Image (spheres, helix red, strand yellow):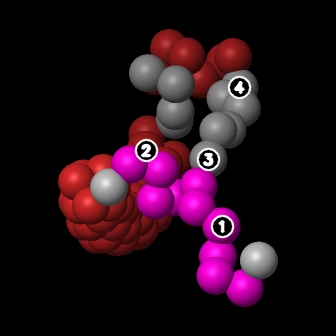
Amino acid sequence: MGRCVDVGDWHNGGFAPKDAAVSQEDRFVDIEIKLAHQEDLVESLNQMVYQQGRRIDQLEAMVNKLAEHIRNNAQSGPNMVNDRPPHY
């Protein structure tokens, strides 16, 4: 990816004319490789965000059910949670 350039080549923009086509092709290949890696990364992140969104929806549904359960139990009578089971 990173390459050392001979200081004597700086007068030609960093590369000798013969190396210009090869180095430009190498640069395009490097860019295409980086783009492919970034596309994979974006797809992986997108999948992770989708899964987390589904999990958040599940957790919100659970919280709503628990809140409803607590409201229903609070209305059914005081201290129902702290009563001893019948076998005591």
Q: Nearer the viewer, mark 1 or mark 3?
A: 1
In percent of width and height, residue 19 lies at: 51, 47
| Residue matched to label 4 | 6
Q: Nearer the viewer, residue 65 or 35?
A: 65
Quadrant in which residue 75 is drawn: bottom left
Query: If you read the primary sequence from the N terminus, does the residue marked by circle 1 or circle 2 appear first?
Result: 2
For the C terminus, give its image quadrant.
Answer: bottom right
Q: Magenta stretch: give its range.
A: 78-87
**Contact check, label 1 and label 3, Cβ < 8 Å:** no
| Residue matched to label 2 | 20
Whether residue 9 sits left or right of residue 38 in the image: it is: right
User: How many angstroms separate mark 4 from mark 2 (CA)?
Assistant: 14 Å
Three-letter code for the amino acid on which mark 1 is drawn: Arg
Q: Which mark is residue 84?
A: 1
In percent of width and height, residue 51 lies at: 35, 70
Element under disc 2: helix
Query: If you read the primary sequence from the N terminus, does the residue marked by circle 1 or circle 3 appear first?
Result: 3
User: How many angstroms separate mark 1 from mark 3 (CA)?
Assistant: 72 Å
Quadrant in which residue 50 is drawn: bottom left
Q: Which mark is residue 59?
A: none
Three-letter code for the amino acid on which mark 2 is drawn: Ala
The answer, for residue 51, to whether it is visible in the render is: yes
Query: If you read the primary sequence from the N terminus, does the residue marked by circle 4 or circle 3 appear first?
Result: 3
Q: Residue at x 65, y 67 (%)?
A: 84
Element under disc 4: loop
Q: Nearer the viewer, mark 1 or mark 2?
A: 1
| Residue matched to label 3 | 1
